[in-house]
Image: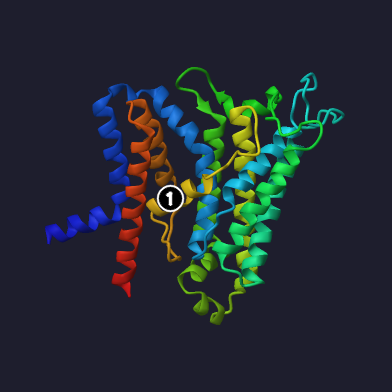
Amino acid sequence: MNTKRLQGFASQYAIYIVLVVLIIGITAYNPAFLSINSLRDVLIQSSTRTIIALGVAFILITAGTDLSAGRIVGLTAVVAASMLQKAEYAARFFPDLPQLQIIIPIVIAILIGLICGLVNGFVVAKLNVPPFIATLGTMVAVYGINSLYVDMEPNNSQPIAGLRDDFKIIGTGSIGEGKYSLPYIVLIAIFVAFIVWVIFNKTKLGKNMYAIGGNIQAAKVSGINVAKYLMYIYAIAGSLYGLAGVLESARTGGATNNYGNMYELDAIAACVVGGVSTTGGIGTVPGVVVGVLIFTIINYGLTFIGISPYWQLIIKGLIIVAAVAFDMRKYAAKK
């Protein structure tokens, strides 16, 4: 009986056990990892990735996938950055553009992300194209659009820099000073995670999202307008990618058309490791957040103790395969 209870506990909290083991292992090798500065850096690096992963989680829970997330992040980062450069910066993207109120480019970038999400949703829901193919097409098209945008005169594919201080502070500023300060970007990620948790658990949209992912035919029979809700879900995901793009450009102080490259794979991996089922219908916000933290700790922590990036990739790959295998085993057991 005790063995069964232990197995049940390990199964239910496996993701949290992995996170604790990672932290203990890295700290044992180098105790400096557990410093406030290191943990603060981990949280900052996790912030935009968490927002992207939460967007991807919406899609995965409906038994879909989204390969366009990273490129949408890149496009929105470039759009926001191009309109928020300092007036005195010599290589401005729009030399004659007046200094806009900061909210305007941010809203434009988020709306672009929303539109990209709507396109994905329309192709999936109305044209019945499999999500993998639909979002693959969007990924390629968005990268092309972004590259054309960055290549416009007078920029000519140069990295976009010289961003305004009132914009950069969103990604680099904090409440308070010193190592105990609270970065704005972390607070924004926490707020977004809370809003997504409310959507998942307290709204009709969330209820129908899980129903669609659990059994789409049963959802249709029960009267759910699957096409409408899929479009809502993809639009919300696109908006989150747009917000992440804005924050990423603010955090790094610039943008290029290669921003966001492969971010979608990290987001999908974090979701899967965090317990979002690849077969749909299962997933939680805390699980996604912990999944992101695990991969951030792998990247940051192993670099911190001097482990080769190639070993980091091997470890990440093994964790992803193990998580999916575990998920499929549970799915087979239910059947």
Quarter containing the C terminus: bottom left
Q: Which residue is labeled 1 in the image?
A: 269
Coloring basis for residues: rainbow
The residue at 62%/53% (across/down) is 139
Drawn side of residue 162 relative to residue 202, left or right: right
**Residue placed furthest toward the right:** 96
- Give residue 234's position: percent from left, percent from top: 61, 59
Q: How many marks?
A: 1
Say which amino acid is labelled 1: Ala
Above or below, 237 against 87 in this view is: below
Drawn side of residue 21 relative to residue 1, left or right: right
What secondary structure is found at the residue carrying circle 1?
A: helix
- Give residue 229's position: percent from left, percent from top: 61, 67
The residue at 36%/44% (across/down) is 316
The residue at 52%/70% (across/down) is 212
Disc 1 residue crowd, few under 14, some 14–19, many 20+, Cα 10 Å: many
Drawn side of residue 142 relative to residue 265, left or right: right
Which one is nearer the viewer's eye here, 116 or 167? Answer: 116
Above or below, 289 against 306 in this view is: below
Drawn side of residue 212 relative to residue 331, left or right: right
**Quarter of the view holding residue 127:** bottom right
Which one is nearer the viewer's eye here, 59 or 205? Answer: 59
Above or below, 225 against 28 in this view is: below
The residue at 51%/74% (across/down) is 216
- Give residue 74's position: percent from left, percent from top: 63, 42
